[in-house]
Image (tube, helix red, strand yellow):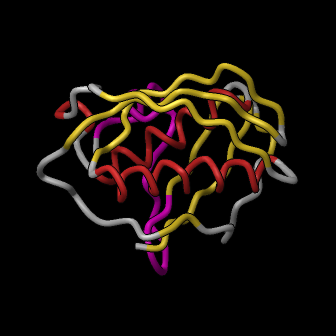
Amino acid sequence: MGGAGMKERRGFEEVEHTADVALRVWGRDLAELFVHAASGLAWLLVDPRTVKPTVSFTLELEALDAEGLLVAWLGELLYLHEREGIVLVAFEMEEITPTHLRGTARGGPASDLRGHIKAVTFNEMAIRPTDRGLETMVVFDA
């Protein structure tokens, strides 16, 4: 899976979980946390280096809180993966608050999928401040 330096650069790491698939995700701020979570989702699906970002989607989402917004964001990326047959691998946050985001996701067709993710869950999700910014656990139903 790569050394500690690689984990720091990508902003997420897969963690052992009793069921399904889980990532610990961190970022300096909310925008970086959301980008790292989306990058982690892409990494679970495919080697992101094998995907050419040929399509782009602008997403605008609202939720009651930051955790709900993160679940909505990742859920939308999963929906686009299923509907369009693509993996989104590049992300940009244009505007983000704990209840609203507008961002862009780019991706393309992918062969050699690593696995299948059915849904994002609220299980164990709590965005909390740490010495490196914000951190949370994201559990996926696989």
Q: Where is residue 89 in the image (x, y as percent from the top left)?
A: 36, 34
Q: Where is residue 75 in the image (x, y as percent from the top left)?
A: 55, 56
As for residue 18 lying within the magenta part, the answer is yes
The quadrant in which the C terminus is found is: bottom left
As for residue 72 lying within the magenta part, the answer is no
Magenta segment boundaries in residue numbering: 2-22
For this orientation, the residue located farthest to the left is: 112
For residue 30, what is the image quadrant? top right
For this orientation, the residue located farthest to the top is: 94
In the image, is residue 12 above or below residue 81?
above
Residue at x 66% of width, y 19% of height = 94
The foreground one among 121 and 95 is: 95
For residue 59, what is the image quadrant? top right
Q: Position of residue 21 (x, y in %)?
A: 44, 67
State left or right for residue 73 relative to residue 61. left
In the image, is residue 1 above or below residue 8?
below
State left or right for residue 110 relative to residue 84. left
Residue at x 68% of width, y 67% of height = 122
The foreground one among 25 and 38 is: 38
Q: Where is residue 36 in the image (x, y as percent from the top left)?
A: 53, 35
